């Protein structure tokens, strides 16, 4: 078995085909031999019946003879009622056993006499001298010879068929596995090339298992490339974005060293360094969180009631943020949702409660920061979060979260790239998380749940962010 496993797939398919073909061929030879043997046996029985017809018709009128027995392989014997053989062309070996043959009845039977094999038929005829018997026999040597030669011919033919079947199986297996060889060669080229030059595995025109395998492997290659691109992008972004805060932190620590003799200046330097360290930690956490989100689909599930609960909790956190910040005083934070329409209780959004709360915190924090940075005139400044249900394009339902603020909005040319990481239009909408990652995290979380984010400036001012999240039962 271990040796068989070491063989190639083509060899294993060929060997398996040969074994199956050999079994079927031998079965066919046995069936044909049995069928032909039965036909020959029935033919011999028919000849024996014909052999006894003429003597059986003549005996009632001529019970004492004379008897004209035929020859040419028709072995006959006439036995009177007393058991005496009146006439016989039977071989001597059969004549010696004639009384036992008569006593065995009228059914055809096979008898071995010396080296010869006979088929014997006995017929009883009523005459004026009593019950007389006709014994007919035919040698089965010709039948056995025919069967032996037929068997040899069938075995030779079966061998030829098996050999041809094996060759055809080998050729078909080679042809069927040729796309696998091309995929392997392409995989070797992909492994030895740069990501920019690497292609994908060839997908054949036929919609078969090999095409499905190539398609699945191509999807895997694309996911691996995307993962590698994300890692390279994260390393590049981290090195770029962390360089400035690290330089600032180093400068602040050097100033603290110079101000070692001045307690007030030293305390100020330490506080500045602490704030910079917090920003560094926040930036690193956001980078790791963004990398985790983009690595694959969300494994969380959240129902409609939990979405509403997370909305009210996020509004409470936003109001607490406004009340604790003097610069944000006067900003009204409110929410809306329609309690009359609810989805199927078994339906879920593919997000965890924490991730949905993160979306709300980032959007509400961005809106508050935008209004706070717009200037001291914030009369009737509002931030409103609305959650509602809508019908989706695929016939299902969609949870729609809308966050609207009365801030300065965004430049129109910046909106298409607003969800990219480390992008900032100006200092007005940097987001609560800082570093230009707030909206990028929102977009990544929505994408992981199968949804999308749309940004649009409101009239006459402000920004509206719409997050559409599909609700499904699966």
Image: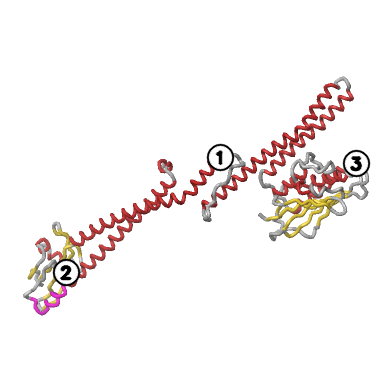
How many angstroms separate mark 2 from mark 1 (CA)?
A: 86 Å
Residue 121 vertical placement versus 156 (above, below)? below
- Residue picked out by circle 3: 327
Q: Does the image show residue 354? A: no
Question: What element does badge 2 sit on?
Answer: strand
- Residue picked out by circle 1: 191
Q: Nearer the viewer, residue 464 or 247?
A: 247
Left or right of 421 in this view: 139 = left
Indicate which disc, 3 or 2, sits on the residue closer to the N terminus: 2
Identity of the residue furthest to the front in this view: 197
Q: Nearer the viewer, residue 209 or 16?
A: 209
Q: Position of residue 436 (x, y in %)?
A: 78, 41
Q: Does the image show residue 422? A: yes
Q: Nearer the viewer, residue 175 or 302?
A: 175
Magenta extent: 52-63
Question: What element does badge 3 sit on?
Answer: helix
- How many other residues sit within 10 Å of disc 1, few (<14), some (14-19) or many (≥20)? few
* The N terminus - image quarter: top left
Left or right of 311 in this view: 120 = left
- How many other residues sit within 10 Å of disc 3, few (<14), some (14-19) or many (≥20)? some
Residue 62 colored in magenta in the image: yes
């Amino acid at each position: 078995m271990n040796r068989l496993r070491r063989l190639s797939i083509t060899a294993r398919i060929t060997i398996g085909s040969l074994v199956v073909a050999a079994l079927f061929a031998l079965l066919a030879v046995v069936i044909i031999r049995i069928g032909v043997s039965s036909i020959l046996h029935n033919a011999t029985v028919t000849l024996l019946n014909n052999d006894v017809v003429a003597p059986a018709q003549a005996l009632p009128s001529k019970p004492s003879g004379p008897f004209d027995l035929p020859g040419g392989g028709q072995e006959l014997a006439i036995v009177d009622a007393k058991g005496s053989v009146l006439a016989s062309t039977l071989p001597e070996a059969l004549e010696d056993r004639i009384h036992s043959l008569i006593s065995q009845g009228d059914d055809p039977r096979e008898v071995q006499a010396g080296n010869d094999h006979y088929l014997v038929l006995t017929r009883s005829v009523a005459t004026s001298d009593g019950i007389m018997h006709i014994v007919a026999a035919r040698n089965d040597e010709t039948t056995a010879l025919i069967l032996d030669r037929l068997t040899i011919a069938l075995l030779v033919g079966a061998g030829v068929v098996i050999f041809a079947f094996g060759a055809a199986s080998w050729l078909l297996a080679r042809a069927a596995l040729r796309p696998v060889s091309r995929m392997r060669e392409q995989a070797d080229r992909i492994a030895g090339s740069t990501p920019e030059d690497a292609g994908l595995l060839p997908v054949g025109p036929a919609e078969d298992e090999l095409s499905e395998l190539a398609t699945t492997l191509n999807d895997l290659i694309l996911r691996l490339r995307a993962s590698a691109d994300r890692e390279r992008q994260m390393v590049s972004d981290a090195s770029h974005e962390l360089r400035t805060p690290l330089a600032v932190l180093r400068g602040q620590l050097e100033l603290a060293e110079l101000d070692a003799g001045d307690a007030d200046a030293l305390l100020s330097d330490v506080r500045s360094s602490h704030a910079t360290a917090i920003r560094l930690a926040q930036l690193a956490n956001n980078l790791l969180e963004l990398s985790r989100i983009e690595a694959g689909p969300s494994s969380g599930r959240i129902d409609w009631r939990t979405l509403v609960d997370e909305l009210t909790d996020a509004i409470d956190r936003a109001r607490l943020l406004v009340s604790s910040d003097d610069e944000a005083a006067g900003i009204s934070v409110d929410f809306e949702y329609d309690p009359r329409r609810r989805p199927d209780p078994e339906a879920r959004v593919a997000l965890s409660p924490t991730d949905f709360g993160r979306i709300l915190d980032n959007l509400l924090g961005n809106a508050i920061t935008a209004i706070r940075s717009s200037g001291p005139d914030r009369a009737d400044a509002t931030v409103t979060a609305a959650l509602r249900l809508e019908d989706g394009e695929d016939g299902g339902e969609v949870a729609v979260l809308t966050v609207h603020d009365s801030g300065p909005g965004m430049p129109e040319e910046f909106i298409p790239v607003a969800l990219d990481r480390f992008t900032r239009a100006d200092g007005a909408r940097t987001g609560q998380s800082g570093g230009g990652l707030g909206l990028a995290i929102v977009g990544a979380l929505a994408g992981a749940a199968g949804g999308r984010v749309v940004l649009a400036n409101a009239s006459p001012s402000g920004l509206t962010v719409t997050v559409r999240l599909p609700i499904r039962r699966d």
